[in-house]
Amino acid sequence: MKLEKHQIEEHNHKLLESHKCKVDFLKSEIKGSEEIIRKLVEFQIAIPSWALGTGGTRFGRFAGAGEARSLEEKLEDIGLLHALNKSSGAISLHIPWDIPKNAKNTKALAAQLGIKFDAVNSNTFQDQKNQSHSYKFGSLQHVDKAVRDQAIDHNLEVIHYGKELGSESITVWLSDGSCFPGQLNFRKAFENTLDGLQKIYTALPGNWKMFVEYKAYEPNFYSMTVGDWGQSLLYASKLGPKAYTLVDLGHHLPNANIEQIVSLLLMEGKLGGFHFNDSKYGDDDLTVGSINPYQLFLIFHELVEGMDARKMNHASDLGWMIDASHNVKDPLEDLLQSVEAIQLAYAQALLVDQQALEHAQQKNDVTLAQEILQTAYRTDTRALVAEARLQAGAALNPVGFFRDLKVREHLIKERGMQTIATGL
Ligand code: LRH
Ligand code: MN
C-alpha cells in the first residue's frame, strides 16, 4: 500500500493548529529545540524483517491478517511505516527467513521506498530442511567440528547476501549453551565459539562490523555461551576492531543495570548497537517503552553523555534496531509505537543539562543531580518528535493516520486473511 504526499498533508492540516500551539510552548520552555529536532530527523531506526507478522509463544500463535507474505511485501510494509514517521528508513534481515530471490530487484525496491539494509542476522538456532548436521547441541560451540563448520559456512553465506544488498554489518546471536550442569565444558565451548567467530570475522568485508549479541537464558536454561555483556565484550575484544557487542534490552537477568552496561561498553569503544524492546520478566520482546520507559530514558541519557564524550555521531555510529514480537497487537501499529518511544526517550536525553549535572555530581549533590535528570524525563517531548516528523514530511499522528486510512483492512483485501509472514 503506497501513501501519497497529499494524503499526509491533509492529515497534518487537521492537526496543525493544536500541534503548533504545543511545539511553540515547548520551544519557549527548553533550550536548543531546533538542534534537537534536527537530530530527531536524522535518527533512523531499523525495523526487523521478522517482526512484520504476528509472533507467538510455545503456547500458541493467534494469526494476524493481511500479513506480509514475502520479502517484497515486508519492504512495502516498512516503506509504509517510513512514510508515516520518516524514522524507519532501514530493514534488518534474518537469513534464511528472508533470503532475497533476486538481490538486484530487492535492492531496487528498497531504494524506491527509501529503505536501507542494516545488519543481517544469521540463524544457527533452528535446523533447516535437508540440513546435514543438527544444531540441537549448539552451533559454533559444538563438540563436533562438522557442525561448527556448517555454522561458519552459514554465516559466510549471510555475509554474501548482505554484501549483495548493501548491508555493512552482521549480527551473530547464538542460542548455544546448556540446560544442565555437567552437559558442557564451558572453556571448550568458549574456545570453539571464539574460533568460529574468528573465521567469520576474517571473512568480513573491509568496512563491515560484527555484532556479538548476548543473552542470559533461553533456549538454554543453565548456561548460554554468549550469556552476558562481559562474555560478549571478551569475544569482541579478542576478535578485533571490527567486532562489537550488541545490547538486546530483553536479554538481561532481572534488575540488571543496563544503562551502566551501556556506559561502560561505550567507554571501551565496543558498543555496536541495540535491539530495542521492553520486558517485565524475560525476553518478552514487548513494545519499546511500554513497561519501563524510565529505564529507556536512562539508557539514552548514558548514550548521549557517552557518545558526546567520544565525539560520536548519534545517528550513524551505532546500530539502532528494534527486535520485537507481536502476540496481541497489529505488528505495524506496534512498530510505530516502538519508534515513537525511542524518539521520545532520545529527545528527553538531549534535554538533560549535562554541565549542570556534572557540576552537581562533582559536589555530590545527589538531590540536585536527580532533579536535573528527572526534569528532562518529566518533559513531554511528543510535540518535538511530532515537529521532526512534520519537517521530514511525515504524519503528525502515525498510529491515528494508520487507523484513519484503514491500512490493515486494505492489506487484508490485498493479501487475504490467512497470510503468514516468515519469522518467529
Ligand atoms: C534472540 C533474538 C535475536 C534474534 C532473534 C529473533 O532472542 O533477540 O536477536 O535473532 O531474537
Ligand atoms: Mn535480539
Image (cartoon, rainbow, N blue to C red):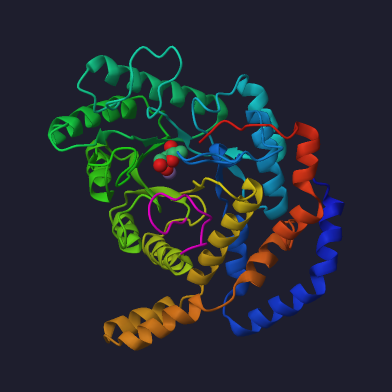
Q: Is residue 151 above or below residue 410?
A: above
Residue at image coords 25%, 35%: 177
Residue 271: % across, % down: 35, 50
Residue 15: % across, % down: 80, 69
Give the side of residue 377 with respect to residue 16, left or right.
left
Q: Does residue 2 appear in this view?
A: no
User: Magenta span: helix, strand or loop, mainly?
Assistant: loop
Residue 366: % across, % down: 31, 85
Q: In this view, does 299 lie above or below 274?
A: below
Seen from the viewer's position, the closer of residues 343 and 220 is 220
Seen from the viewer's position, the closer of residues 354 and 372 is 372
Give the side of residue 47 with respect to residue 177, left or right.
right
Residue 391: quarter of image: bottom right
Residue 265: quarter of image: bottom left
Magenta segment: does it hold 273? no
Residue at image coords 48%, 57%: 314
**Over which residues does the magenta segment extend?**
278-291
| Quadrant showing the N terminus | top right
Instruction: Determine the residue located farthest toward the front in the rendered image.
Output: 59
Residue 31: % across, % down: 57, 80
Residue at image coords 49%, 25%: 96
Magenta segment: does it hold 290? yes
Q: How many marks?
A: 0
Q: Does residue 153 appear in this view?
A: yes
